[in-house]
Amino acid sequence: MNFKLPSPISISKLRSIRLLTVAGAALMLAGYASAQQKPVQFAGATCDATPFLRCPDKDCPPEKVINPGTVVEMKTRRTYFLDYPCDLKPGEKVTFILSLHGFGSYGNWQRHYFPIVDYKDKYRLVIATPNAPTRSWSADDDQYLQNIVESVVGQIGKENIKAFWLVGHSQGGMTSNRIVRTDFFKERVDGWLSLSGGRLGGNPGRASFGPRPAAAATPAATATPAASPASAVPPAINAAMAALREPPVADFSFIYETGQREMDEKGLPDSSAWAVKYNCASRRAPTEVVDTKAGYVYDSTRQNPPNPAWGLPPSPGKAQVFVYPDCKDGRVVADVVRIDKGHTEGLEPKITEEMIKLMLSAKGGKMQQAR
């Protein structure tokens, strides 16, 4: 059988076609990979380089402080704040934090009282900060909080949650203590950071906050308080405090932070039953953290006359960090005392970062095993 070989020109054309085909396929794959690596965008949560409704370094306007956020929890139709790295990639591992404000406060006040949003990019944090419409947390809010967790985790993927922490200031800390005992949270929470919200393992004595002034300024006219003094706390909350004195059965790391002036003259206990639970070694000598920059917020309604135990205007300061080392199962147990601070001065940047580092050093992974 006779057949004709392709001419040199034909062979050259075939090679060109093959090269173009391979190049085109490579470009298609590159485009697909690029599309696959598009940053995560949470539903209803825009992401900007400067966090949404970020306060200035001082004198935060009241209309910012009381804003409830713009992300809608679709089942209850209540809003919250959601902060995350704008360059978060699909499949990237993150630490998820649910941060609860104190009695009488708002979500955006909490975002600036404990300003972890400033570190979301550096430490790859996803932070949900909800709001209680009554400005006081109760069991009526539990479904709303659970819905937020399920929505955020559903969009990240629970396999990408390195650790899940509760953070709560004052009554928000008490609420963290309560919900971590519920079935939903006890199987998911890896750690709890209590910001003047109660100490597991033995509480320090409390200084007197004094009565709230009868003619206090309204939230619309001044910076908003983070919580109310003991004399203004409803009986139901006092009853809840009594019910939470027994330690929870769930396993998680625990960090307690308080202002030195919130405690009585005995100061911080030198032992911790929570540390004993995890066979931690004896508490180390404290390390000192020095902040030259003040926090963002405070309670301006309680400054005439000032009450140091309740809190003065923000200022630079020092903090002492007490760690119980070598806890079993990778748990972290620590206490933090902010020197010459009260209940409501916003936390300074370096001590905020130090507590983030402690949180990230603890064992995580419970979310991945949750049902």
Image (tube, rainbow, N blue to C red):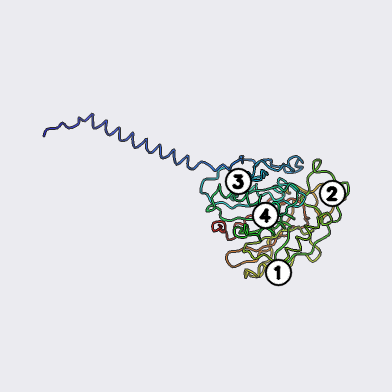
Q: Secondary structure at mark 2?
A: loop
- Residue indicated by mark 2: 303
Q: Earlier in the sequence, mark 3 or mark 2?
A: 3
Is residue 257 at all visible to an observer of this figure? yes
> Disc 3 on helix, strand or loop?
loop
Where, by quadrant of the figure, is residue 25 drawn?
A: top left
**Mark 2 or 4, which is nearer the eye?**
4
Instruction: Using the numbered discs, state the Cα–Cα distance from disc 2 to disc 4 in whole angstroms.
Output: 27 Å
Residue 326 seen anywhere in this rendered image of the structure: no
Separation of marks 3 and 2 at Cα, in angstroms? 35 Å
Q: CA distance from mark 1 to mark 2?
A: 34 Å
Q: Is residue 10 above or below residue 362?
A: above
The span from disc 1 to disc 4 (Cα, nearest Å) is: 22 Å
Frontmost of labels 3 and 1 is 3
Q: How far across and down, in percent of the image, does residue 95 sit?
A: 59, 53
Residue 322 versus residue 166: which sits nearer the camera? 166
Q: Residue 274 in the image: state x and y as whole percent.
A: 67, 67
What residue sits right under mark 1 in the picture? Answer: 271
Q: Residue at (75%, 49%) from the top-left corner?
A: 135
Indicate which disc residue 167 carries.
4
**Dot 1 or dot 2, earlier in sequence:** 1
Above or below 134: residue 368: below
Q: Which residue type does callout 4 highlight?
A: Val
Question: Disc 2 marks which amino acid?
Answer: Gln
Dot 1, crowdedness within 10 Å: few (<14), some or many (≥20)?
A: few
Amino acid of disc 1: Ser
Image quarter hosting the N terminus: top left
- Whichever of labels 2 and 4 marks the residue nearer the N terminus, that label is 4
